Amino acid sequence: MAYSCLPLLRSFCRIEVPRYDRRSRSAAFARARDLLLARKAPGATFADFDGVQAAAKVSIVLEEPRAEPPSYLTSDPETLESIPHRLPEAYELIKTLGGVRNPIHLVRRRASSKLFIIKQVSLRHENDWPDESTLLEYLIHPNIISIESVHRDHNGPSSIANIVLPYCSGGDMAELLSHLSRTGKPMPVQFVQHVASSLLDALLYLHRGETYNPPTDSITRQEPHQTILHRDIKPANILVHQPTLTHNSLPQILLADFDLSTPERLCSNLAGTDGYMSPSVAQAFSHPASTIPQMSPADDYFSFGVTLYQLITSGKPYDYQTTTSSQMMMQDIARCTSANEPEILNLMLECLDSDPQKRPLGKAGKDSLKLHRISAKLKKGLQKWCESGGRLPEEIWAGPLRFAEEGGEKERELTRRLR
């Protein structure tokens, strides 16, 4: 794709500019696979603020799929049509849920009646593995979606992979923000704190392989660890999962959709969603140049900052290009319930700094221990809030959160409704 065509891509919301084709990118992933999986931590578990062991899962809404722009553009873009007849035999199709570039299906495992999500992706070669599944096998964290299994299918005109993801009943942040905007309800400050803490933990693990132990104020770092760039952090890729059958605890927050993710050392292109990209990346799309900026964790933190701004303001768009954006931003925040939360506001403003070096983990930004402490402080406050009887109001949800017990009546009832 000629870079002179880049301004035309602004009409798409989610775009990628490659320096080399996907064949070479897949080869690079294959070379890195052994290193990535060498330090996979089997059986790793983490505890949320209430001490409950959490397992990462994926959440897909069951309503009709929203119309969304293409996932990204490449030098040879291709979209996989829905092919439910090529699902693994062990799974029964309940409903096709859509998908932008890749079909998404709700299925039931025949042997156990447990619900799962299957994402179908095309493979260029029979020996390929989906880049997303390679990363998710390596990333084990309660705030990152997990992967159940991958089934390759070569019995058609092209090879595909069926990526099996655990099903959970909830929606994404974009839907929640849309609902709050329609109803005029504010985002509860406790929920903003919970999302901020959860995503901060996920990013520190993605970028540095770190987890934090509050009692000893110490960091444990996974070794070896490659810095992973998500490159598409936004509300639509943040999922909400309620792991219990009651509303007596805060839902689990999961960072999802690793289609555009890559180890930093293999990153030779630009990717992201319009409105969430950092200024340097957005400007590279608008003003093509011979030198393309190297993406880094600072770009993920900028997207995180935009997401925090939208959570605080219940979905208002953020535009760094307008001269009055900072003043308008502070006016919008002043009217919100999170206006008196210095940890959240300071974190958001640091993430949105135009200078990448002043964002978190930059040379002039907060170091990782300070970020871990911010997350732990938010969790401690939320724990006290829950112990004192604090609960999220039911009316913030677009509808009642649906729960599925494996093999239970609620799951069977849900399945009947979806047919």
Image (cartoon, rainbow, N blue to C red):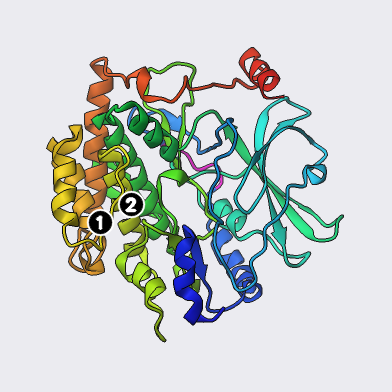
The quadrant the C terminus occupies is top right
The structure residue drawn at horizontal position 24% and vertical position 51%, both measured from the top left corner, is 371
**Relative vertical location of residue 319 with respect to residue 26 in this rendering, above or below:** above
**Relative vertical location of residue 15 with respect to residue 118 in this rendering, above or below:** below
Crowd tier of the residue under label 1, counting other residues whose Cα lies within 10 Å: few below 14, some 14–19, many 20 or above: many
Distance between the Cα atoms at labels 2 and 1? 7 Å
Q: Position of residue 143 (x, y in %)?
A: 43, 42
* Foreground pick, 237 / 267: 237
* Foreground pick, 72 / 213: 72
Magenta region? 42-46
* Foreground pick, 300 / 407: 300
Q: Position of residue 46 (x, y in %)?
A: 43, 38
Residue 316 in view, yes or no: yes
How many badges with numbers are in the image? 2
The residue that disc 2 covers is 304
| Extreme residue in the right direction | 155
Q: Position of residue 139 (x, y in %)?
A: 51, 52
**Secondary structure category for the residue under label 2:** helix
Q: Is residue 399 magenta?
A: no
Q: Are marks 2 and 1 in contact (CB under 8 Å)?
A: yes
Crowd tier of the residue under label 2, counting other residues whose Cα lies within 10 Å: few below 14, some 14–19, many 20 or above: many
Which amino acid does the dot numbered 1 rest on? Answer: Cys
Residue 341 in view, yes or no: no
The structure residue drawn at horizontal position 18% and vertical position 45%, both measured from the top left corner, is 345
Rendered image: mark on residue 265: none
The residue that disc 1 covers is 351
**Secondary structure category for the residue under label 1:** helix
The structure residue drawn at horizontal position 44% and vertical position 65%, both measured from the top left corner, is 10
Q: Main secondary structure of the magenta part?
A: loop
